[in-house]
Amino acid sequence: MNFNKAIIVGRVIKDPEIRTTPNGQTVASIGVASNRVWNSNTGERQEKTEFHNIVAWGKLAEICGQYLVKGQLVLFEGRIETRSWDGQDGVKRYKTEIVAENMQMGPKARSQEGGASTYQARENTQNAPENNPQNSEKIVQAEPQNEQSDSGNSQNNSKENNNEEEIKIEDIPF
């Protein structure tokens, strides 16, 4: 059995780049940075940032272009693909990307925080051809996950009833 699944949680490093293919399919390129923190053998705290290339197609790409902004926390789930091409200098080039199938957005970056609604976009590619994402038929649903209430009282009452702590973006380590 073969399995190819990637899950990346990190911050968008620049606003998504949206393009349209000659056959009319929308594609988004998104850069995401994720951090890894560990202690060395000497107990010294170490940190490393990895940069990931994400590609989204169809309705999911449109949602990425509309809602994602630099600095925003995001989760992408998809498959890893490596593509190759011959450069203008004749050298064969490779690029490894995560082809997004699902996405969940966190609140926008602190400097751009407005509505803190979280949306989830799901893409169904079960009936799509595996090797040609440009021609794939994709179904994407965007559903509000947590909508902020206009009245602060109803929000405070629900917190008291559920005894849940509010998670602040500053508390997330990356």
Image: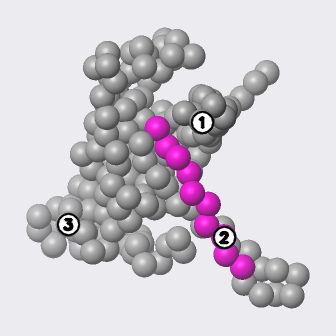
The colouring scheme, among rainbow, by chain, secondary structure or one colour, is one colour
Q: What is the x, y in percent for residue 7?
A: 58, 46
Q: Is residue 53 above or below residue 62?
A: below
Q: Nearer the viewer, residue 24 or 5?
A: 24
Look at the image and say whether residue 51 sits in the magenta stretch.
yes
In the image, what residue type sits under mark 2?
Answer: Lys
Q: Answer few, some or many: residues within 10 Å of disc 1's Cα (few below 14, many 20 plus, some between 14 and 19).
A: few
Q: Residue at x 56, y 51 (%)?
A: 52
Q: Is residue 162 above or below residue 59?
A: below
Q: What is the x, y in percent for residue 128?
A: 48, 14
Q: Nearer the viewer, residue 10 or 104?
A: 10
In the image, what residue type sits under mark 3?
Answer: Gly
**Disc nearest the viewer among 2 and 1:** 1
Q: Residue at x 86, y 87 (%)?
A: 42
Q: Residue at x 32, y 15 (%)?
A: 23
In the image, what residue type sits under mark 1?
Answer: Asp
Mark 2 vs 3, N-terminal side:
2
Q: What is the x, y in percent for residue 80?
A: 62, 36
**Disc nearest the viewer among 1 and 3:** 1
Residue with the mark numbered 3? 114
Q: Residue at x 72, y 84 (%)?
A: 45
Residue with the mark numbered 2? 48
Q: Answer few, some or many: residues within 10 Å of disc 3's Cα (few below 14, many 20 plus, some between 14 and 19).
A: few
Q: Nearer the viewer, residue 2 or 88?
A: 88
Mark 2 vs 1, N-terminal side:
2
Give the residues in magenta. 46-55
Residue 79 shows up from this direction: no
Residue with the mark numbered 1? 89
